[in-house]
Image (spheres, rainbow, N blue to C red):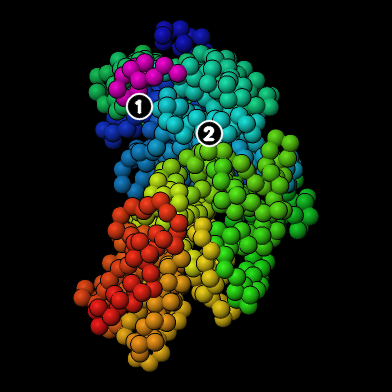
């Protein structure tokens, strides 16, 4: 690559793009940590995109109809931070750039959405960003169909690298995007042929262009350092009805001694080499110093969208007051006022009729009253619609011919589904929920963790939550998955005991604005245990006294989900022998932990023996058995010792000793 030719062919563009290169090199060198090569290599693409195509206003980074920019290759975070600083973003200042990767800085090692308004999503685990982008594009299509082009009409742009495309999640993402014909999604592939270990050919020979074409994408191949070719390719991509991939042949660490090598991927910190690179670029400014004319040009690029934003605000103001209010409500994530009323009505009906249903069916019953009053919900399933019970009759299917449809057939794509749902939640205006089996949280796990980190209110509907699923056996029977989900910070894990608790859990989940929820739901039918209707949402406390002791309280039984009815039956056995027994239902540990000490003491007072019952491994239960005023010699667990087995559910519960009789014997053995 002839740097001199690049400099002379488009001198103005070259210096503007080199401002990104210089800032990336300076910041990484100052931190002695980071990834310089990708920002240096993709600076030309980013410069053309931000200055000529991206619809944004740096002064108002949360404007609802802005184009979204996702840096899927999140290790190249300095590309994004340099762009935001140059364009005049109020949060990413020069001081922030200088503090790259330092404690408390908004300029983290990988982009984090909660640190600055202009950062759309948290990227770092490769492939997640491109999979998020599918959700962004789905949300845009859905909102455009609902509110019209005057309010919603924008694109989602992505920069992805070889690592993003090697990760398996990318295949799920591009397959879904191609099938749904998400024409407002445009991906730039940083085709630099380098990974950390060396050339891509060390580990891969995939023809990525053919792969994207086979998935139904519009594909172009260009020189990633030619601004005219980049500009023309973006123009062409915006005109097609397919999602677009632009293969940008680029040079990692362009002009540096590490160009086109694996060393160019990482932190370029050798002063002599860095100075030589700047000399080759024709960059004479001091570290972190941007020439005034270059900075001024970039700030004009950053304010280029101000007129578009002002026109959009006028269009919004011209809408009826009711339409404005509804648009604002869904974009801010506020639940509708009717939600509480329909949940209370369902609870009352269930308490009076006491049906015996699986909580997956109870979830469907809740969604049947929720979806009509929350037109922003977008449901789906990873090819388990009939098993997850996530489709209600009023939704319609989101497809190429029906963007108003609110149900997505994701196919067998748990990774892609979970990450796309995060993208929808991050985009705003829609409330995504999607289902698979609880055991397959393993497949959705990277996105579930990122939902918690990114503070997105995604709802993961996980059915077939224990050995209660029966004959499918231990491959499908989750035993450790509750513990894994509960171990994740900023996650609400609900395991409801009946339809009433399930409805309450849904109400709580849909009121969240910064916390994801996991719904752990049964395959097998469960009796209604909440037979007395209460307007109050008891699940909101996380745990509560379902049935108190008659006579002197000698035992407390704690349980979740399908085991609450077992605990209630054990109570009957114990009370018959004069042993006063309290049953505590614990549908959400995280909410119980958040209660004040006085409430937790009332629910779990010191003194009585305690037995916890859950058809899962015991990990985590020590907190409630031996903490919170409990004692080691007065606590026991009834649950799974390891993996499950293939057999009918009733036989399995007997085989593993998860029965009312076993619970009663545990209590008596400690008295």
x and y, in percent, of residue 306 in the image: 63, 39
Front-most of residues 558 and 271: 558
Dividing the picture into quarters, in which one does residue 490 lie? bottom left
**Farthest residue, direction left:** 633
Badge 2: residue crowd in 10 Å (few <14, some 14–19, many ≥20)? many
Q: Is residue 70 magenta?
A: no
Task: Identify the residue at horizontal 31%, vertical 62% (top origin).
Answer: 618
Residue 530 visible in the current orientation: yes
Q: Which mark is residue 173?
A: 2
Callout 1 secondary element: loop
Front-most of residues 276 and 417: 417
Badge 1: residue crowd in 10 Å (few <14, some 14–19, many ≥20)? many
Task: Identify the residue at horizontal 60%, vertical 70% (top origin).
Answer: 355
Front-most of residues 439 and 441: 439
x and y, in percent, of residue 480 in the image: 35, 54
Identify the residue position indicated by label 1 in the image: 36
Callout 2 secondary element: helix
Front-most of residues 602 and 429: 602
Alpha carbons under labels 2 and 1: distance apart: 27 Å
Range of magenta residues: 194-206
Task: Identify the residue at horizontal 54%, vertical 27% (top origin).
Answer: 187
Q: How many numbered discs, if any? A: 2
């Amino acid at each position: 690559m002839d740097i001199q030719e690049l400099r002379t062919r488009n001198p103005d563009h070259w210096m503007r793009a080199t401002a990104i290169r210089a800032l990336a090199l300076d910041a990484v060198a100052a931190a002695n940590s980071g990834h310089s090569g990708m920002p240096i290599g993709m600076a030309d693409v980013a410069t053309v995109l931000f200055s000529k195509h991206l619809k944004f206003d740096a002064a108002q980074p949360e404007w609802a109809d802005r184009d979204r920019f996702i840096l899927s290759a999140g290790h190249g975070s300095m590309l994004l931070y340099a762009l935001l600083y140059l364009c005049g973003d109020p949060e990413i200042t020069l001081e922030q750039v200088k503090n790259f990767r330092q404690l408390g800085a908004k300029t983290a090692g990988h982009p984090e959405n909660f640190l600055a308004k202009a950062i759309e999503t948290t990227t770092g685990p490769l492939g997640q960003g491109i999979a998020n982008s599918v959700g962004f594009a789905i949300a845009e299509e859905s909102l455009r169909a609902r509110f019209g082009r005057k309010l919603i009409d924008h694109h989602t742009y992505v920069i992805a690298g070889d690592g993003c495309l090697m990760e398996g999640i990318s295949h799920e993402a591009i397959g879904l995007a191609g099938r749904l014909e998400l024409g407002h999604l445009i991906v730039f592939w940083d085709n630099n042929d380098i990974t950390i270990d060396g050339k891509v050919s060390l580990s891969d020979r995939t023809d990525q262009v053919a792969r994207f074409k086979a998935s139904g994408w519009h594909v172009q191949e260009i020189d990633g350092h030619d601004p005219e070719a980049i500009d023309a390719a973006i123009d062409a991509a915006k005109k097609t009805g397919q999602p677009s991939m632009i293969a940008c042949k680029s040079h990692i660490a362009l002009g540096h001694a590490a160009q086109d090598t694996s060393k160019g991927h990482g932190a370029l910190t050798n002063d002599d080499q860095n100075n030589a690179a700047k000399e080759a670029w024709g960059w004479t400014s001091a570290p972190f110093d941007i020439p005034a004319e270059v900075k001024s040009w970039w700030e004009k690029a950053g304010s280029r969208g101000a007129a578009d934003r002002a026109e959009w605000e006028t269009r919004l103001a011209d809408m009826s007051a009711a339409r404005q209010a509804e648009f604002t409500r869904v974009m801010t994530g506020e639940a509708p006022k009717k939600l509480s009323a329909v949940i209370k009505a369902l609870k009352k009906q269930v308490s009076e009729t006491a049906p015996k249903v699986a909580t997956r069916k109870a979830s469907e019953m809740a969604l049947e009253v929720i979806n009509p009053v929350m037109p922003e919900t977008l449901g789906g399933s990873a090819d388990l619609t009939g098993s997850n019970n996530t489709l209600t009759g009023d939704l319609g299917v989101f497809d190429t011919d029906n963007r108003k449809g609110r149900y997505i057939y994701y196919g067998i794509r748990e990774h892609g589904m979970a990450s796309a749902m995060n993208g929808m939640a991050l985009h705003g205006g829609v409330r995504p929920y999607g289902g698979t089996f609880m055991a397959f949280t393993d497949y959705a796990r990277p996105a579930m963790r990122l939902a918690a980190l990114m503070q997105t209110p995604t709802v993961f509907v996980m059915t077939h939550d224990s050995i209660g699923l029966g004959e499918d056996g231990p491959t499908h029977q989750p035993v450790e998955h509750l513990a894994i989900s509960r171990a994740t910070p900023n996650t609400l894990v609900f395991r409801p005991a009946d339809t009433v608790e399930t409805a309450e859990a849904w109400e709580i989940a849909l009121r969240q604005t910064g916390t994801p929820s996991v719904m752990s739901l049964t395959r097998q039918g469960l009796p209604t245990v909440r037979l007395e209707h209460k307007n109050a949402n008891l699940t909101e406390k996380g745990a509560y006294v379902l049935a108190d002791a008659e006579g002197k309280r000698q035992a407390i039984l704690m349980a979740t989900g399908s085991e609450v009815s077992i605990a209630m039956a054990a109570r009957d056995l114990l009370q018959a022998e004069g042993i006063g027994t309290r049953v505590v239902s614990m549908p959400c540990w995280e909410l119980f932990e958040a209660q004040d000490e006085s409430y937790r003491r009332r629910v779990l007072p010191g003194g009585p023996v305690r037995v916890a019952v859950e058809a899962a491994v015991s990990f985590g239960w020590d907190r409630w058995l031996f903490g919170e005023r409990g004692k080691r010699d007065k606590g026991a667990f009834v649950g799974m010792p390891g993996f499950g087995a293939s057999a009918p559910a009733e036989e399995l519960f007997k085989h593993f000793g998860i029965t009312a009789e076993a619970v009663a014997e545990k209590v008596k053995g400690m008295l």
